[in-house]
Image (cartoon, grey):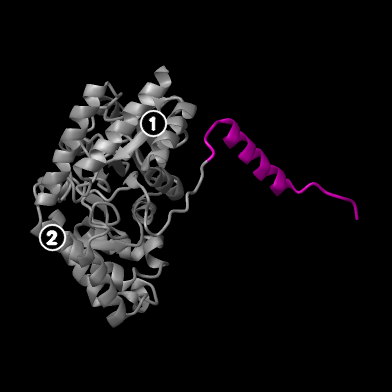
Amino acid sequence: MGSHTDPWSTRLAKAAEQRRADGGWRQRPTLSDVAPFIDFAGNDYLGLADDPHLAEAQAEAARRLGAGAKASHLVSGHLEIHERLERHLADLTGRPRALLFSTGYMANLGVLQALCDRHTRVFQDRLNHASLIDGARLAGATSRRFHHRDLEDLERLLGRAPDDTPTLVVSDGVFSMDGDVAEVGELAATARRHGAWLMIDDAHGLGVLGEVGDGCVGRAHDRREVPVLVGTLGKALGSAGAFVAGDEALIDHLIQFARPYVYTTAQPPGVAAGTLAALEVLAREPERRARLHERIARFRREAGTLGLPLTGSRTPIQPLVLGDNARVMRWAERLARAGLRVGAIRAPTVPKGEARLRITLSAAHGDDALDALLDGLAACQREEVA
């Protein structure tokens, strides 16, 4: 037999070579169980991931109900604790019903796959999360992306869509790489004028924004304004999983047709118990949100004094856009040596030329932590000048 070149090996090698040449090669750090650094890269905005109440609730439910749910929700995996959590999430967001998913990515894929097909039109903010872009592709829907937070561009695109075509406008609530917030009321009004539904993924707003931590949508914008609301449980709520909230017809439709829901083992009962505990803390301790926003204000004030390239974000996501991949990696590595972990974000996660440090703040960050971060950033500046 003659020798043959393995086309798959060649394909993988070329992709790796190109990614390295672009300066975008990703490394997966393995962190110790007891972190030797201050974390400014995660999404634990309220400091709940380390709260003992959540850990105790998870452990107790695991001992009582088992480590796993054993089956999908539609077979034998839907437990009373899941039902109770769904009711609490519906109440938090002011919706009739909510439906649990295992991850936020699956929730977005499930909604778009179940609602859309080649006969529907989807209009997405250009900076939407990858799961929303991928969901429209999975559905085979005609998809257009409007300029970031540009209502005039959205209006223009919607005006070209046929009146009799089911249309869905989709936006992040808080944009994960920029930290700015969608103009939900204006998006809702624009969608209504064109007979479209509005879907908001409020992954980074839930627990952080709103009068009771109900996010940038929640009770401020009812289901007539925002028929489809997605939230995640592994960020400000410190647990894991996600949910979709809406009216009876929407949730029934997802139970019947959302493949990432139908064909997935249900969330472990301990995780559901941990999220219920998080919702109790969210209601009982509003001072966590108040402290988080004080942390944000202090960081912005002092980073501005240093002349750091801040964006306009008023959320826990505080990007420093440095532009160049190599510069971003130098700053991140310098901060890591000082025991500070931040996100080093490059293309394709953000557009080329917009590489950044993604700094995230938490109610758990004390003054010493913020001082260390600001000192580290100032040191990065000084090294560039030297």
Q: Which stretch is magenta?
A: 1-25
Residue 361 vs 284, above or below: the answer is: above
Q: Where's residue 221, x and y in %?
A: 13, 45
Q: Is residue 2 magenta?
A: yes
Element class at badge 2: helix
Visible residue check, residue 246 = yes
Horizontal arrangement in the rendering, residue 336 relative to residue 235 (left or right): right
Mark 1 lies on residue: 356
- In the image, what residue type sits under mark 2? Asp
In this view, the residue farthest toward the right is 1
User: What label sits on residue 91 in the rendered view?
Assistant: 2
Q: Is residue 165 magenta?
A: no
Q: Main secondary structure of the magenta part?
A: helix
User: Which label's residue is closer to the chain start, 2 or 1?
Assistant: 2
Q: Where's residue 64, x and y in %?
A: 28, 82
Q: Where's residue 191, x and y in %?
A: 22, 37
In this orientation, which residue lies closer to the viewer: 327 or 251? 327
Image quadrant where one finds the C terminus: top left
Q: Residues under labels 2 and 1: Cα distance?
A: 37 Å
In this orientation, which residue lies closer to the viewer: 294 or 165? 294
Quarter-of-image position of residue 333: top left
Residue at 11% of width from left, 45% of height from top?
Answer: 290
